[in-house]
Image (cartoon, rainbow, N blue to C red):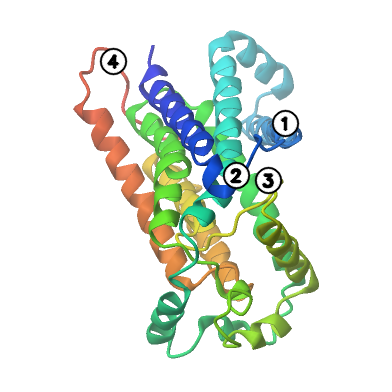
Amino acid sequence: MEEREWFIPSAALTGLLGLAALLLMPVAGYSEIPPYFTRFLNWVTWSLVVAMLVLAVHVVKLHRAGVTEPVAHLKAWLQAKKTTTLIAVAGMMLAGIDMLFFMWIKPEVTAFAPFWSDEALADIDHALFGMDPWRLFVGIDLTFHAWAYSFFWMVAMMATLVWLFIQPPSRERSASLLSYFALWSLFGPIGQMLSSSAGPIFYERIGLGDRFSGLQRNIPDVTQKISDYLWALHTSGEPAVGAGISAMPSLHIATVAWIFFVFHGMRSRIAPFAALFALYIFALSVALGWHYAVDGVVGALIAWLAQLLCRRYLVSRPREIGIRPAADVV
């Protein structure tokens, strides 16, 4: 079965991430597993919402293609593709479990490797731009963008996963799915451990001075409230939803870069729009103070590296199952 090429190693990566989070509990001072069941239900709910959006887009495409009863056509297709549907459900549930394990290990990584690289990262940004790059966005009302930064990012990530699951099996599709799990289970946690940083928005709170005091006056209230919430969780040491602060590498940017690599690798016409979306989220990560610009650059690089290594891993495997090369998709 073609799906084994990505599902088995992805499940293994997810299991290893959970095991690592369990073993690191004493480091963070946790005496019990974080209560993330409600968070998983949220993932399931949003998966259903995003899946309905993806299917609605397909109905519109069928209508524009001249299909007289696009809903009935889509229903018949889903009934004929029960295996595809089951794989999509299983894949989304595995991705949800992987995300919960990442949220569990994130504050543990901070406890294991306290923030140490913020000054160096801020200096690199200044050297690259001739200033702290958040200043490029002074005077721009970021209220809507602060909301879009998280909401659109999440919807785009989940929609890309759903889209991938319903594509015909191919080596490129398998590599894209596997690289998603590699990002969250392997590259992200290791990268955060090796280069622990809090980000510009927390620069003063970690005792490094008022270099980014002007940033606090430029960001919207919603961003400030979220940062206050994260800092309260960080200082309390309690295992709660959203706990954990880490700027380098930016997994926000790694994810949107992954989205671009997915559509580019699958030769989809969505690729240029994915590239623009990635640049938009990258700009917001700097403007809102969540990340140094170099965090995003490294995030994009690890997304590219994950995709490259996963392709090579799959190509090196014996091709006992005739997986087709990626076909042109919309």
- Against 87, residue 192 (above or below) is below
Where residue 93 sits, quadrant-wise, is top right
**Of labels 3 and 2, the one closer to you:** 3
Rendered residue at 65%/34% (across/down):
33
Q: Which residue is mark 3?
A: 239
Q: Nearer the viewer, residue 275 or 131?
A: 131
What's under tag 2, amino acid-wise? Met
SS of the residue under disc 2: helix
Q: Which residue is mark 2?
A: 103
Q: Residue furthest bottom?
A: 130
Residue 273 in view: no
What's under tag 1, amino acid-wise? Phe
Q: Nearer the viewer, residue 299 or 271?
A: 299
**Of labels 3 and 4, the one closer to you:** 3
Q: Which residue is mark 1?
A: 37
SS of the residue under disc 4: loop
